[in-house]
Image: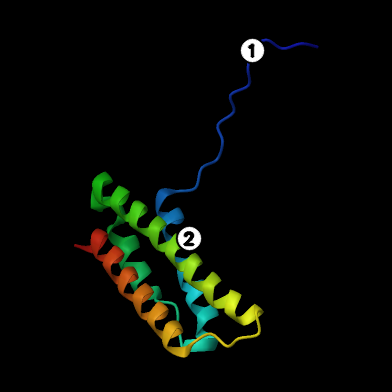
Amino acid sequence: MLHLVPDFAPQPRPEPYAEAVSRLASIRHALRLVDNHAGGPAPDLDQDAKIAAVWDEAGPAKQRCFDARSSRIVGATAAGVEALLVEREAGRMPHAEASRELVDQIRRELAEVARVVLA
């Protein structure tokens, strides 16, 4: 039977904070991948808890800024990890200093993006 009335069932959408935490978790997971090469950090769950505590009060402007900056960090992290993996797949050991610099840069950016919401 032909139905002319479209079915607009609402699509489930992730909670905004859940998506933000997911991004940070993906970045930290990438850092753990680099850990084999440069001693990356353990997950910073305390920072996530602090962000969760103030997320709703941060306001839409800070949330959008956090979203935009965390998106850029995800892209940069992926590019950095991919460069290290390309070296490894080519049979070359990734340069230890490059790995350390990648980890340090991502740590700094994670701290900066957290300050967007925590400030």
Graded by Cα atoms within 10 Å as few (under 14), some (14 to 19) or many (20 or more), the crowding at tag 2 reads few
In the image: residue 104, left or right of residue 7: left
Q: Amino acid at mark 2?
A: Ser
User: What's the residue at 56%, 36% (across, down)?
Assistant: 11
> In which image quadrant can residue 90 be found?
bottom right
Classify 82 as above or below 21.
below
Question: Which residue has dot 1 on it?
Answer: 5
**Residue 54 percent coordinates (x, y):** 27, 59
User: What's the residue at 48%, 60% (across, down)?
Assistant: 22
- Label 2 or label 1, whichever comes before in sequence order: 1
Figure quadrant of the N terminus:
top right
In the image: residue 51, left or right of residue 78: left
**Residue 100 percent coordinates (x, y):** 41, 85
Q: Which mark is residue 75?
A: none
Q: Which mark is residue 22?
A: 2
**Residue 119 percent coordinates (x, y):** 19, 62
Q: Amino acid at mark 1?
A: Val
